[in-house]
Image: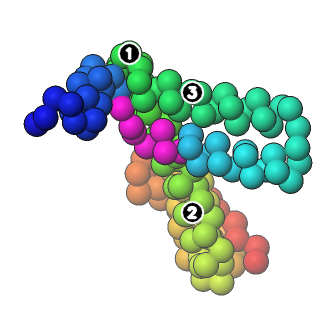
Amino acid sequence: MNPNNWKYKLTVWMQGRYGIDPLYKALLIAYAAIVVLNLFFPSTLLWALSTATLVFAVYRVFSRQIARRAEENRRYLLARDSVKKKALLLVNRARSYKTHRYRQCPNCHTTLRLKKQIGTVTVNCPKCHTTFQVTIRH
Ligand SMILES: [Zn+2]
């Protein structure tokens, strides 16, 4: 590759630096959202928040502390997946409201999907095998 090529120069300069990851993309989306919000509700606080978000996103890309950046990204992905899982559960709950009810196991806190049966039933948790009573009123 031509050493005067800007792509080559960028590649050399980026060596040992962290680069782009899903958290970077999320930070840019957050930045854009705050900028739009600031258009409707202009405030110094929102401006400062958007600038801080952008600076942090760019700082992470060029950071040489790769392990620390990777750990931030790992924590972000865990939180994102947890939110996704909860949102999906809410959607499924709403969809199957006529036929099923969701209850948490008192022992392992797993959410169980139970056939809607008015009255009290004995449930055996498939995960931890705890037996407990569930009352479905409506
Ligand atoms: Zn359980």
Residue nearest the viewer, comparing 25 with 2: 2
Split into 4 quadrants, where in the image is the C terminus?
A: bottom right
- According to the image, label 1 marks what residue? 65
Q: Residues within 10 Å of mark 2 (few under 14, many from 20)?
A: some
Q: Residue at x 65, y 84 (%)?
A: 98
User: What amino acid does circle 1 point to?
Assistant: Gln
Q: Residue at x 48, y 38 (%)?
A: 24
Q: Residue furthest left?
A: 1
- On screen, residue 3 versus residue 19, left or right, reads left
- Cβ atoms at labels 3 and 1 below 8 Å apart: no
Q: Residue at x 65, y 48 (%)?
A: 32
- Disc 2 to disc 3, C-alpha distance: 32 Å
- According to the image, label 3 marks what residue? 56
Name which quarter of the figure residue 126 lies in.
Answer: bottom left
Q: Earlier in the sequence, mark 3 or mark 1?
A: 3
Q: Nearer the viewer, mark 2 or mark 3?
A: 3
> Is 26 above or below relative to 3?
below
Q: Which residues are magenta?
A: 19-26
Q: Residue furthest front?
A: 4
Q: Residues within 10 Å of mark 1 (few under 14, many from 20)?
A: few
- According to the image, label 2 marks what residue? 89
> Is 7 above or below relative to 83?
above
Split into 4 quadrants, where in the image is the N terminus?
A: top left
Magenta highlight on residue 127: no
User: What amino acid does circle 2 point to?
Assistant: Leu
- Disc 3 to disc 1, C-alpha distance: 13 Å
Residue 117: mark in rendering: none
- Disc 2 to disc 1, C-alpha distance: 37 Å
